[in-house]
Image (tube, helix red, strand yellow):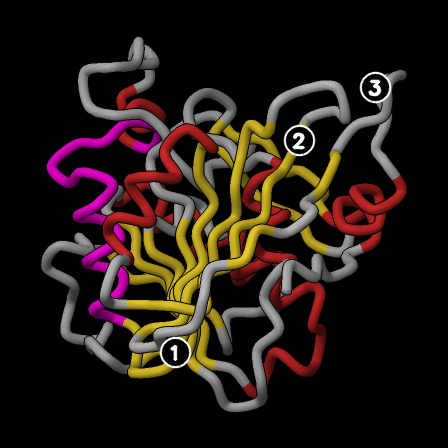
């Protein structure tokens, strides 16, 4: 293994090889949730997008890979609190030829760096920690534990901080455990509308394990519950729709 990082890592294909990502061999690693959330984004030329809790840069790299040359017209910022993950995110932008359009900043969404201006982003996206503080058996990997469980911010606080980054009438999109939908809706109450809830099922026989939520800041539009996505067939393969997203870089229309 090369000495690009101070820990062991792998370099893995995503979107059928359209993009490649360096990832720690142990600790936080990109999942299908990252790919699904990235696939929901349909930005317009000139828009600014912020990924909060950017990890190793999976969301923005997958987005740029799917859009290709069109991504040159976007401003893509990542904000990540863990210095090692920032290193990975920057290296992944370079690896895929996106260093001219993806910039990852080290910082805390509770006190974002000056480069990440509040009320300036057309779309903020985030894959917040999945588990409530002290209600999940933490991973022995400190970095993975921080990525998976609430630390100094509750999920409601995380949503509120993200909303502060969104410009008026802009959008916030999240992917989260389905069981935490109530916390998300409570944090959005009175502050955002036109809320789309898009469930994701592992199989058509399972309960929805994940939900993608999109909301428009300052809107008073109604909430809509969509049909959602089934990821796996009964034999363990991808459904046609999931295959198109995961291996062929297609968008995921949740609207």
**Within 10 angstroms of label 3, few (less than 14), some, or many (20 or more) residues?**
few
Above or below: residue 231 compared with residue 41: above
Give the residue at x 57% y 89%. 45
Task: For residue 103, say whether it is visible.
Answer: no
Please rate how many residues cluster around mark 2, counting C-alpha atoms within 10 Å: few if below 14, some from 14 to 19, many from 20. Answer: some
N-term-proximal mark, 3 vs 2: 2
Q: Earlier in the sequence, mark 1 or mark 2?
A: 1
Q: Residue at x 59, y 83 (%)?
A: 72
The answer to whether 149 appears left or right of 56 in the picture is left
The tag earlier along the polypeptide, 3 or 1, is 1
Q: Quadrant of the N terminus?
A: top right
Q: Is residue 111 magenta?
A: no
Q: Is residue 84 visible?
A: yes
Q: How many marks?
A: 3
Res. 201 mark: 2
* Residue wearing tag 3: 236
Q: Which residues are magenta?
A: 147-165
Q: Provide residue 164's location: percent of width, then percent of height.
A: 20, 69
Q: Secondary structure at mark 2?
A: strand
- Residue at x-position 17% and y-position 52%: 108
Judged by depth in the image, the label closer to the viewer, 3 or 2, is 2
Query: Is 60 left, or right, of 166 in this rendering?
Result: right
Q: Is residue 112 above or below residue 186?
A: below
């Amino acid at each position: 293994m090369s000495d690009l990082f101070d820990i062991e890592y792998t370099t893995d294909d995503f979107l059928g090889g359209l993009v490649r990502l360096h990832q720690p061999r142990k600790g936080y690693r990109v999942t299908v949730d990252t790919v699904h959330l990235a696939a929901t984004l349909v930005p317009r030329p000139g828009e600014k997008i912020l990924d909060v809790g950017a990890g190793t840069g999976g969301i923005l790299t997958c987005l740029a890979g799917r859009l290709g040359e069109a991504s040159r017209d976007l401003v893509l910022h990542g904000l990540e609190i863990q210095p090692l993950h920032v290193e990975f995110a920057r290296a992944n932008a370079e690896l895929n030829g996106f260093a001219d359009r993806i910039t990852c900043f080290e910082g805390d969404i509770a006190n974002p760096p000056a480069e990440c201006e509040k009320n300036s982003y057309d779309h903020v996206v985030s894959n917040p920690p999945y588990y409530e503080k002290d209600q999940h058996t933490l991973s022995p990997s400190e970095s993975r534990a921080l990525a998976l469980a609430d630390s100094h911010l509750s999920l409601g606080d995380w949503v509120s901080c993200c909303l502060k980054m969104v410009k008026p009438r802009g959008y916030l999109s999240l992917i989260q455990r389905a069981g935490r939908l109530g916390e998300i809706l409570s944090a959005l109450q009175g502050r955002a509308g036109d809320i789309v809830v898009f469930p994701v099922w592992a199989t058509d026989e399972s309960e929805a394990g994940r939900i993608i939520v999109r909301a428009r800041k300052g809107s008073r539009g109604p909430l809509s519950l969509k049909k959602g996505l089934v990821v796996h067939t009964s034999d363990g393969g991808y459904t046609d729709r999931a295959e198109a997203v995961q291996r062929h870089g297609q968008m995921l229309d949740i609207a």
